[in-house]
Image (cartoon, grey):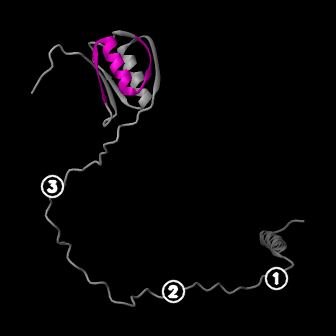
Amino acid sequence: MKLDRFSAGFLLLVLVSMANAACTVSNKEAEWQQPKKQKVFKIATRQLPPEPVYGALRWVRPPQVLPEREIPTSSAPLLMPVIQFEVKDKPLSEVALILAATAGYRSYCAGSIASQKLTLVSLGTLEELGREIEEQAEIEVLINHRYKEVRFLAKDLVSPKI
């Protein structure tokens, strides 16, 4: 059976439309839903007038030199803990570091005496240990409690006087 061109096109159109109808058929009918309303807010308005604007100029007192800070002092003696200090054949730079570390202080040792060796076994406060090191090593030990510092310096033959 030979189909002419028109009937072949018509048959193809019928088949395509049946396939389309079979794909789109469902048991439930599509229900039309009204789109949700969007919330619309009013434009913000002031209920009170704006605050008055003042100039940026302010009246201030002229600058003055700050008074010196007075640290309250007491006539009571400084209480220092007693320390067991034991050093065997160590250079003075390490001895200064160990002595300062026991009190939580910083240390400094002059380069000219840093390699000098010291052996000491003693018991006493930081000040007493400093005096013993001074006598034994023949150096100058300065302990500054205000700045938390221990300094080992070479002993001057002639101390400057003002």
Alpha-carbon span between mark 2 and mark 3: 58 Å
| Residue type at tag 3 | Val
Please tell me which residue is depicted at 64% across the width and 84% down the height of the picture: 36
Circle 2 SS class: loop
- Residue located 40% across and 91% down the image: 47
In the visual, does 56 lie left or right of 144? Answer: left
Q: Which residue is mark 2?
A: 41
What amino acid type should be assigned to the residue bearing mark 2?
A: Phe
* Image spot of residue 141 (x, y percent): 30, 21
Q: Which one is in front in this view, the residue at disc 2 or the one at disc 1?
A: 2
Which residue position is annotated with label 1?
Answer: 29
- Determine crowd level at label 2: few under 14, some 14-19, many 20+ residues with C-alpha closer than 10 A: few
> Which residue is at 17% across, 13% downward?
157
Q: Nearer the viewer, residue 25 or 80?
A: 80
Magenta residues (range): 119-143
Q: Is residue 52 visible in this depiction of the protein? A: yes
Residue 129 part of the magenta-drawn span: yes
Report the residue that reaches farthest toward the right.
Answer: 1
**Total count of labels:** 3
Which quarter of the image is occupied by the N terminus? bottom right
- Identify the element where label 1 is drawn: loop
Seen as rendered, the residue at the extreme front is: 76
Badge 3 is on which residue? 65
| Residue 141 included in the magenta stretch of the image | yes
Marks 2/1: CA–CA distance: 37 Å
